[in-house]
Amino acid sequence: MRPNPRQKTRLISAATAATLALLTCATDLWVEHRTEKRVVAQAERRLKPDGPVHADLTTPLAGLRTLGGEVGDVEVRAKGVHAQHAVLDVSIRLKDVTTNGDSAGGTATATVGYDQVTRRLGALGNGLTAGGRDGHLILTGSVGRLGLPLTVRATLGTTAHAFTITPTTVSVLDRSVAVDDLADLPATSGLRDELRPRTVAVTGLPHGIALTSAHAADDGLVLGFSIAAGPTPSTGRKAA
């Protein structure tokens, strides 16, 4: 049975709408891919990482938004970024980014491997190896002439431009004691002096970026940052 003219018109309208939807989707994907490539290229120029850089536009129809000067929310990940004599894996999330380089602010994390943390502990970690457990920084090694296994648990605190490592407990042969009590025990006052809190400055942060947290994850020490709304930090150039 042939469709009547009204049904035929509906079929044509439906086919046209579907075709337009496909064209819009294809155009959006093409523009979005092009924008992501530009964000990656700019991140590579600024961060100069050893490893790869990835960018994702997470706002719906992000590609078509760029035609009106908006990019939307952007996430950038880069491995092997060199900063303060350390190599970091960085993740940056910005909200409401525009093609002029402004944003509504966002957050970032920088992960430092525990091998680097161990090297930078100095006297605090003399002979100890850093790791993470349950959000605490854990230092393990041996102590004394007998080489007894030693575990030090430390908490992490932050200010806008520094983080502080504060040892809280020491465990030897499954017995734990608070670091503050070491001074009262024979032959351990020297260890108490070595385990005083140590503050590490985080310098050279671009304007508008502040340290907000420090967390001992399984794969490294994770530093969290806030990013203020306004121009993309450290640049007056366009973001996309």
Image (cartoon, rainbow, N blue to C red):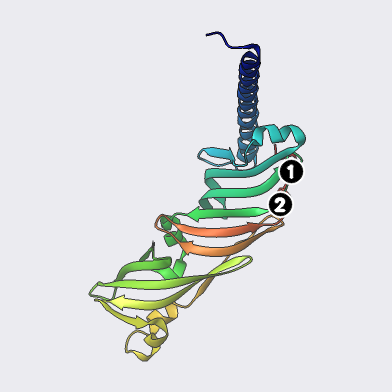
Does the residue at mark 1 contact the one at mark 2 (Cβ under 8 Å)? Answer: no
- Would residue 194 be found to the left or right of residue 84 on screen? left
How many numbered dots are placed on residues in this image? 2
Q: Which residue is drawn at 45% across and 60% down?
A: 117
Q: Nearer the viewer, residue 32 or 237?
A: 32
Q: Which mark is residue 101?
A: 1
Q: Is residue 111 above or below residue 51?
A: below
Residue 87 x, y percent position in the rendering: 51, 50
Residue 214 x, y percent position in the rendering: 52, 64
- Would residue 30 be found to the left or right of residue 101 on screen? left
Q: Name the residue under label 2.
A: 104
Q: Which of 96 and 212 is in front in this view?
A: 96
Q: Residue at x 55, y 39 (%)?
A: 53
Question: Label 2: how many residues lie within 10 Å, few (<14), some (14-19) or many (20+)?
Answer: some
Q: Residue at x 65, y 28 (%)?
A: 31
- Would residue 138 be found to the left or right of residue 156 on screen? left
Q: For residue 127, say whether it is visible.
A: no
Residue 89 x, y percent position in the rendering: 51, 49
